[in-house]
Image (cartoon, rainbow, N blue to C red):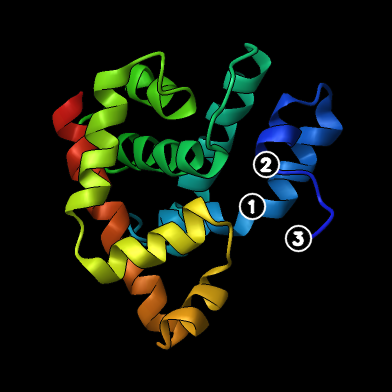
Amino acid sequence: MTGEPTCEALWATPGEDAFSALFRRHEGLGVTMARKFARTPQDAEDIAQEAWLRLFRRRAAGGHVASFRRLLAAAVIFGARRHTETSPAVEHEEISEALADPTENPEASASFQQAINRMDDSPRRVFGLVIDQGHSVEEAAEVEGVSRRTAYRRLGEAMETLERALGRAA
């Protein structure tokens, strides 16, 4: 990724080309996160597509983002909630806003961070490598010294922990 603009810089750059670059760079990550909540590969694609649509609308409204990957994780969680029959179909824009810019809703942002802090070490490390540091899941597996499958499982555990925490914060 050396030499490429950060996700946050692309988010702030006007025009569809910048958003398309974000999408191309992170489309796979959105689907990977969605798989934890999906029953079928098509459901994962639908959840990820809904997450990207949410992000597109947020960006069009001119919203600032402090951590794009955390915002993507939240958008996937909320897409999964609306997509699955067992989850409440509730909008959680205030939490999504807090992840985009923690100053907008410090309580929701704190809930998110507390959920990360309460995670078991292994899922938290993989989440940090993939979401906060921008590594691929494969790179996270190598850093952690585990198989790709284990790294995907740990990222899924982290997403479930966040889903539960964000449900309580809503």
Name the one closer to the observer, 131 or 152.
131
Neighbour tally class for label 2: few under 14, some 14-19, many 20 plus, Cα within 10 Å: many
The residue at 28%/37% (across/down) is 112
Dot in front, 3 or 1: 3
52 vs 93, left or right, is: right
Residue type marked 1: His
The residue at 32%/53% (across/down) is 159
Which residue has dot 3 on it? 1
The residue at 36%/35% (across/down) is 78
Neighbour tally class for label 3: few under 14, some 14-19, many 20 plus, Cα within 10 Å: few
Q: Is residue 103 visible?
A: yes
Residue 155 vertical placement versus 144 (above, below): above
Asked if the residue at tag 2 contacts the one at tag 1, i.e. Cβ–Cβ closer than 8 Å, the answer is yes
Residue 3 vertical placement versus 6 (above, below): below
The tag earlier along the polypeptide, 3 or 1, is 3
Residue type marked 2: Cys
Q: Where does residue 86 sit, x and y in percent of width and height? A: 18, 43
Alpha carbons under labels 3 and 1: distance apart: 12 Å
- Mark number, residue 46: none
Q: Is residue 85 visible?
A: no
Quadrant housing the C terminus: top left
SS of the residue under disc 1? helix
Q: Where does residue 80 sit, x and y in percent of width and height? A: 35, 43
Asked if the residue at tag 2 contacts the one at tag 3, i.e. Cβ–Cβ closer than 8 Å, the answer is no
The residue at 48%/53% (across/down) is 131
SS of the residue under disc 3? loop
Residue type marked 3: Met
SS of the residue under disc 2? helix
Which residue has dot 2 on it? 7
Q: Quadrant of residue 74?
A: top left
Q: Where does residue 110 sit, x and y in percent of width and height? A: 26, 30
57 vs 40, left or right, is: right
